[in-house]
Image (spheres, helix red, strand yellow):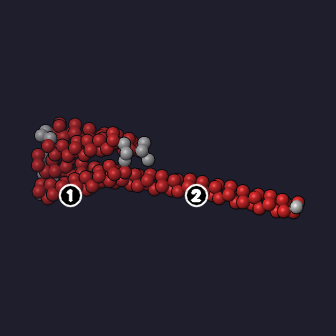
Amino acid sequence: METIIASGIAVLGTLLGSGITLAFQQRTVDRSHRFTRREKLRQERLDAYSAYAGALINYRRCLVHLWFCEHEQPPPEEPDAVRIRAYDLRSSAQEALFRVQMLTDDEELNEAAENVLADVTALARTDTRTELDDARVRTRDDISRLVREAKQHL
């Protein structure tokens, strides 16, 4: 009888040990999956935010160049060609904005990203050099502020 009880206790101990081991392994695997998912999202956000900031900078630079082609001593480039390049860069910036919006849950950051694009687009509609210079500084600062805000969401 003692051997049967000892065997039963051994079997129960083995089952209990296996169950506890399984539970710990599942928790470890779940934690690992959550970490991997968070890290992948962080990396995608980093890529999206960086691409958007780069697209804004390129679009802004092209619009400033277009302004000089149209208003001051034109560089050796046709304004129509620069305008077409500006349209292409705006499309790239909008695509990057959409990616940022899909990856970000924060509505304030999404709104700020939209506003920066609108402000950069308004560069081409300035009439005087003073207005252009003010808008250049403002948009540069807006892009820097957006990058700092986006960094908080990584």
Q: SS at mark 2?
A: helix
How far across and how far down the image is residue 95, in percent? Answer: 27, 55
In the image, farthest residue toward the right: 2
Above or below, 10 relative to 121: below
Residue in front for this viewpoint, 31 or 79: 31
Mark on residue 123? none
The amino acid type found where label 2 is placed reads: Val
Q: Is residue 82 visible?
A: no
Residue in view at x 16 percent, y 50 percent: 66
At horizontal 32% and vertical 53% (from top left) the residue drawn is 99
Q: Which mark is residue 88?
A: 1
Image quadrant where residue 76 sits: bottom left
- The amino acid type of the residue labelled 1 equals Asp
Q: Residue at x 72, y 56 (%)?
A: 16
Q: How many marks?
A: 2
Write the residue at 13% across / 39% down: 128
Cα separation, mark 1 vs mark 2, equals 45 Å
Question: For the residue labelled by badge 1, is the local secondary structure a helix, a strand or a loop?
Answer: helix
Residue 64 x/y as whole percent: 20, 47
21 sits left or right of 139 in the view: right
Work out whether residue 154 or residue 133 is closer to the camera in this orientation and state it. 154
Q: Which mark is residue 29?
A: 2
Instruction: Determine whether label 1 and label 2 are within 8 Å by CB.
Output: no
Q: Can the viewer see residue 11 in this picture?
A: yes
Disc 1 versus disc 2: nearer the observer: 2
Labels 1 and 2: the sequence-earlier one: 2
**Residue 61 horizontal side relative to residue 35, left or right:** left
* Position above or below: 115 against 66: above
